[in-house]
Amino acid sequence: MDTARDRAGGDAWQDADRWDDGDPWRESLARSRARRVKSARSSRARRARLTRSSTRGLPAKVIGALAVAAAILAIVLTTGGTQTSPSPAAADAARTAPAPAPQTRTASKHRELAAWRQCPLAIAPAGYVNPLEAAIVNPERIDQGVDYAGVGKLVAIGAGRITEVASDNSGWPGAFIEYQLLNGADAGCYVYYAEGVTPVDGLRVGDRVSAGEPLATIIPVYPTGIEIGWGAGVRTKAYAKVAGQWDPTDDEDNIASAAGKSFSALIAALGGPPGKDEG
């Protein structure tokens, strides 16, 4: 028997079931297993007694809450806390929280982009005045609008509301002023004065202006002169640009846009000098 144990060496515990009933190794193993089973049963019984003792006299709701908390703690200890569920209070708050406010910026942008489409670009001078009546100018080419060189002031064609005033970083080689006409055949249309112009002191977005009211001073001998035309009501963009009537290659080739020709015709109808179609 001793020889068998020597052959088994450290594996004797795994091979114990092969020994006869009277073998002391098997008896020792059986006793060890019995102690472990008894110890486990005793531990479970002791935990049950402690639980009954600690919860005796507590309301059923409290006991239930403790059981839930114990279950959650067990999950956290098992998973390392990486998977958690919101508490009932947090879940209720999420369900009752008001829905996010709709994105009004997108709707506003769509309204802006659609505004220029409503402009008829009518050549109807009733109720309007020549915007060049307080200036001395030489007409130049028609592109997005109409180019001029000269001196003096630019006045509002009709009653309107200022929608843009940019002296710097306008996207143009100079300033940009825009207003929306409030009456006449082109009510709702936008008019811009750009490049070599200086806004009159105190001109602000939202200001109401009347027909013939000075809006800008022409800068004499400005490298690019000035440009006036139909605006789009979209930041500092011209109608021709937004409507897809003009791009930089057209500028190089002196191609006149449809919106530029329309504004030139309106200037002529109001008694001013029209621009030149050089394309």
Image: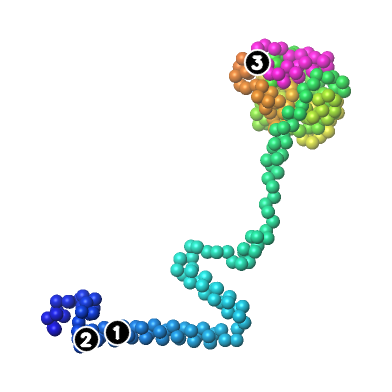
Spatial distance from mark 3 to mark 2, Cα to Cα? 111 Å
Does the residue at mark 3 contact the one at mark 2 (Cβ under 8 Å)? no
User: Image quadrant for the N terminus?
Assistant: bottom left
**Of circles 3 and 2, which is in front?**
2
At x 70% / y 40%, what residue is drawn? 107
Q: Is residue 268 visible?
A: yes
Question: In what element is the residue under mark 2?
Answer: loop
Q: Nearer the viewer, residue 210 or 38?
A: 38
The residue type indicated by label 1 comes to Ser
Q: Position of residue 145 (x, y in %)?
A: 71, 20
Q: Secondary structure at mark 3?
A: loop
Residue 144 horizontal/vertical position (percent)? 69, 21
The amino acid at mark 3 is Ile
Residue 270 painted magenta = yes
Report the residue at 48% width, 84% height from top.
Answer: 48
Q: Which mark is residue 255?
A: 3
Q: Is residue 148 left or right of residue 42?
A: right
Q: Quadrant of residue 69?
A: bottom right
Report the residue marked by disc 2. Answer: 21
Q: Amino acid at mark 2?
A: Asp
Q: Return the residue nearer the eye: 261 or 54.
A: 54
Query: Mark 1 or 3 closer to N-term?
Result: 1
CA separation in Å, label 1 and label 2: 15 Å
Residue identified by numbered label 1: 32
Q: Is residue 32 magenta?
A: no
* Residue located at (70% from left, 44% from top): 104
Residue 265 locus on image (x, y percent) = 77, 16
User: Among all residues in the image, which is located at the extreme left?
Assistant: 3
Magenta part of the protein: which range?
256-279
The residue at the point 64 percent across, 60 percent down is 94
Q: Earlier in the sequence, mark 3 or mark 2?
A: 2
